[in-house]
Image (cartoon, helix red, strand yellow):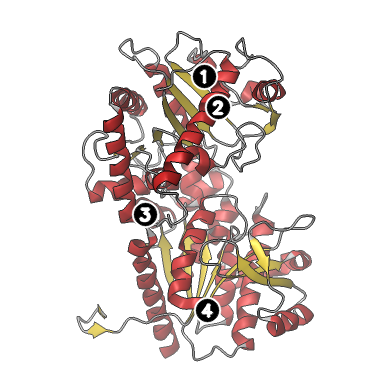
């Protein structure tokens, strides 16, 4: 029950069917995968098998590791669809907690119709695809195919009297939303931007985003930064959705000025049921520490103190946006602090353009070669193709972070995806995260911030900033100064890089002075805070968004 605009109590409309689409359904490439896969259990608990996720079938020579095909599930519809549409779908389960129904669609047959589809979108909505490049064509053809899938499923099962939601994530799915809007007027559409195309581009190109946000013209900046097509579909999808949502107040403000659209905020939750507890947690924590320290020792050729403080930053390789530059700078500062009495090992776990795992390091880890000297590039676990132009390597060298035995701070760049088969650690990111003492995510551009969110869920105290959606959420919940509550949110703006770096340095130094009992207390405080940000608390925002969208459908059908 909610209050309507007239002040009268209204009954909330709940969905009978939900279709949710994303390039990252059964396709683990980024943070949206975490958003959707972690809320799948909650959605299925609420709506059962009337929840259906739709993703791209891009798996040709290997089977998708996150998709369990079921040739019986919706067999009659699948066969009908495949025989008449020119598209091909597979139906099964997404192999994540909750095991929701997933449909993977092979959309390649639409490429022959690409120009006609772009013409239709221009005629109907003025989506400007003229200057498209890169992943635009593939994304938009997939998006268009999801609209066809939803339309056919809707008609095949005669869902005309049902409350149906079609939810589209990111600009890549904009064509799907617009297709459904044109062809299924009774279906309530949601469109979510997790990060605006133009906002990310402004920040990534070194321009001050926040000081001038209200002054920027989104269309003009899209032309200047060569993202006109993506910006166009994103803006028009946002403006035409029955409910346009985004993940934080920060991104909602971006959307207001750059997309000219008002967003309803649906913060990201996290499903932490898979995180080990009790004795299993302690076992994995110790295994992780042993693995991390062993790799560093084999690389450096000397031992690291058993009580070394292990810290890390991670995420997408957006050097400025993710604050990787601030993290490395802070480690340079910390290495010059004479009062530092404990080893600090700082990992940069950020996937880059890797050539291969280091063979010399593999030989030492395998016991074939004695680790009695420091390797060349004693801060790098995998060889890169662009060694001389990599910004992390360049900054490490500039700051003279040489990982000498007398240096208290050792820095280690891990440029590989940590999928359990990277050739050096051979553990997943989560299996390494659990062994850390703290994490640092000094983001300049971060619509939400799953990395600090995941960190505290694994009982690892974290540092983030006021420019991260998750950081702002922690501020609203109450953030004590310092690390005593398991997290710290640093004030960050367009022009205070040096202050941010110094604050990180001071906070990490503070942690090095804490006893084991005090560090255990920090871990417990971090875990307690994570409990306030899981999906059981946050999914209610989606329920409100569905209700808003259904209200728009009712108004549309009155006309």
At mark 1, the secondary structure is: helix
Label 3, label 2: how many angstroms apart (C-alpha)?
30 Å
Q: Which residue is mark 2?
A: 413
Q: Look at the image and tell me in which quarter the C terminus lies.
A: bottom left
On screen, residue 188 versus residue 55, left or right, reads left
Q: Secondary structure at mark 4?
A: helix
The residue identified by callout 1 is: 396
- Looking at the figure, which quarter contains the N terminus? bottom left
For discs 1 and 2, the disc positioned in front in the rendered view? 2
How far apart, in angstroms, are the residues tagged by discs 1 and 2?
9 Å
> 57 or 193, which is in the foreground?
57
Image spot of residue 88 (x, y percent): 75, 72
Q: Position of residue 346 (x, y in %)?
A: 46, 26
Residue 50 numbered tag: 4
Residue at the spot 41% in from the left edge and 37% down from the top edge: 441
Measuring from the top left, give residue 439's x and y in whole percent: 40, 35
**Residues tagged 1 and 2 counted as in contact (Cβ below 8 A):** yes
Sequence-wise, which precedes: disc 3 or disc 2? 3
């Amino acid at each position: 029950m909610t209050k309507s605009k007239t002040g009268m109590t209204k009954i909330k409309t709940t969905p009978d069917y939900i279709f949710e689409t994303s390039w990252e359904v059964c396709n683990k490439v980024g943070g949206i995968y975490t958003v959707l896969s972690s809320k799948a259990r909650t959605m299925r608990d609420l709506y059962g098998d009337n929840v259906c996720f739709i993703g791209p079938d891009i798996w040709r020579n290997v089977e998708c590791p996150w998709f369990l095909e079921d040739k019986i599930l919706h067999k009659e519809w699948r066969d009908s669809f495949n025989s008449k549409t020119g598209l091909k779908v597979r139906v099964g389960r997404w192999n994540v907690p909750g095991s929701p129904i997933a449909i993977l669609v092979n959309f390649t047959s639409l490429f022959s119709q690409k120009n006609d589809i772009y013409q239709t979108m221009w005629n109907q909505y003025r989506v400007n695809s003229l200057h498209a490049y890169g992943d635009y064509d593939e994304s938009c053809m997939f998006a268009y195919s999801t609209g066809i899938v939803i339309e056919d499923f809707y008609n095949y099962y005669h869902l005309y009297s049902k409350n149906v939601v079609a939810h589209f994530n990111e600009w890549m799915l904009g064509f799907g939303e617009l297709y459904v809007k044109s062809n299924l007027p009774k279906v309530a559409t949601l469109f979510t931007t997790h990060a605006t195309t133009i906002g990310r581009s402004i920040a990534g190109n070194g321009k001050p985003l926040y000081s001038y946000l209200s002054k920027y013209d989104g269309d003009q900046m899209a032309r200047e930064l060569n993202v006109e097509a993506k910006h166009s579909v994103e803006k028009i999808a946002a403006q035409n959705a029955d409910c346009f949502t985004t993940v934080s107040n920060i991104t909602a403000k971006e959307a207001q000025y750059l997309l000219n659209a008002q967003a309803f905020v649906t913060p990201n939750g996290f499903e932490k049921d898979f995180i080990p507890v009790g004795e299993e947690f302690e076992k994995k924590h110790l295994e992780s520490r042993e693995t991390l320290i062993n790799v560093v020792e084999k690389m450096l050729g000397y031992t690291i103190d058993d009580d070394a403080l292990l810290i890390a930053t991670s995420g997408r390789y957006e050097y400025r946006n993710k604050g990787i530059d601030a993290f490395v700078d802070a480690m340079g500062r910390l290495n010059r602090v004479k009062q530092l009495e404990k080893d600090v090992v700082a990992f940069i776990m950020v996937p880059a353009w890797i050539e291969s795992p280091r063979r010399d390091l593999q030989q030492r880890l395998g016991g074939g070669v004695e680790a009695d000297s420091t390797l060349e590039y004693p801060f790098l676990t995998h060889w890169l193709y662009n060694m001389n132009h990599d910004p992390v390597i360049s900054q490490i060298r500039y700051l003279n972070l040489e990982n000498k035995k007398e240096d208290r701070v050792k820095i280690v760049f891990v440029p590989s995806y940590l999928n359990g088969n990277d050739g050096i650690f051979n553990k997943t990111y989560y299996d390494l995260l659990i062994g850390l003492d703290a994490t640092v995510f000094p983001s300049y551009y971060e619509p939400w911030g799953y990395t600090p969110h995941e960190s505290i869920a694994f009982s690892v105290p974290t540092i983030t900033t006021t420019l991260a959606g998750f950081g702002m959420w922690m501020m609203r919940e109450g953030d004590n100064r310092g690390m005593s509550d398991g997290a710290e949110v640093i004030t960050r703006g367009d022009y205070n890089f040096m202050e941010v770096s110094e604050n990180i340095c001071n906070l990490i130094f503070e942690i090095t002075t804490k006893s084991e009992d005090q560090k255990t207390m920090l871990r417990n405080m971090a875990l307690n805070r994570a409990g306030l940000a899981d999906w059981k608390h946050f999914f209610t925002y989606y329920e409100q968004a569905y209700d808003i969208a259904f209200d728009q459908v009712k108004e549309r059908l009155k006309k």
